[in-house]
Image (cartoon, rainbow, N blue to C red):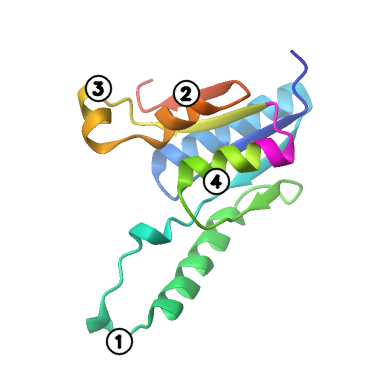
Amino acid sequence: MDVKKILLAVDDSVLGMKAAWEGFTLARQLGASVGVIYVLDIANMPVNADLGMTPEEHLQNLMQEVRKTLNIFPEDAVRFTPQGDPAKEILHTADSWGADIIVMGTHGKTALGQMLTGSVAEHVLRQASVPVLLITEKK
């Protein structure tokens, strides 16, 4: 398999960052281009009216945090910041960008845990048209 484009699905969690850096290492070894996607799941965005922020202001603050997170990565990485369902947006971006592999973190929940809470990684793994490399917390 010839890997030319690697899509890294990240968030601001320790595991998301670990997966991203593992993906960058893989990309360097393969000489592949890197795309980094951080999906804004606005459906689950906490909004607290008591803080005196409108939903738009909260979204702007969240976008600033996303940009700050993405700015730690090398400048030559393509950045994607779609809004929506994380699994669907990761799959759509992988297809439209032409990714050869997706790298992302997973907490390695049990089957029961996934059934009860759902799993972005599980959905991506089952639906992706390209291989998915899952990075776990375990070492």
Q: CA distance from mark 1 to mark 3?
A: 39 Å
Q: Looking at the rendering, in which quadrant would you find the C terminus?
A: top left
Q: Amino acid at mark 1?
A: Gly
Q: CA distance from mark 4 to mark 3?
A: 24 Å
In depth, the one of 1 and 76 nearer the eye is 1
Whether 55 is among the magenta residues is no
Q: Is residue 93 left or right of residue 57?
A: right
For marks 4 and 2 on the same chain, the one whose residue lies earlier in the sequence: 4
- Whole-percent x and y of residue 48? 26, 75
What's drawn in magenta, residue-wise? 95-100
Q: Amino acid at mark 3?
A: Thr
- Whole-percent x and y of residue 76? 76, 47
Q: Could you say which disc has been placed on residue 126 in the image?
A: 2
Query: Compared with residue 42, is residue 116 higher up or lower down, i.e. above or below?
Result: above
Residue position marked by numbered label 3 in the rendering: 110
For marks 1 and 3 on the same chain, the one whose residue lies earlier in the sequence: 1
Whether residues under marks 4 and 2 lie with C-beta atoms below 8 angstroms apart, the answer is no
Q: Amino acid at mark 2?
A: Arg
In depth, the one of 41 and 15 nearer the eye is 41
| Comparing labels 4 and 3, the label whose residue is closer to the camera | 4
| Comparing labels 1 and 4, the label whose residue is closer to the camera | 4
Q: Looking at the rendering, in which quadrant would you find the N terminus?
A: top right
Whether 97 is among the magenta residues is yes
Q: Could you say which disc has been placed on residue 52 in the image?
A: 1
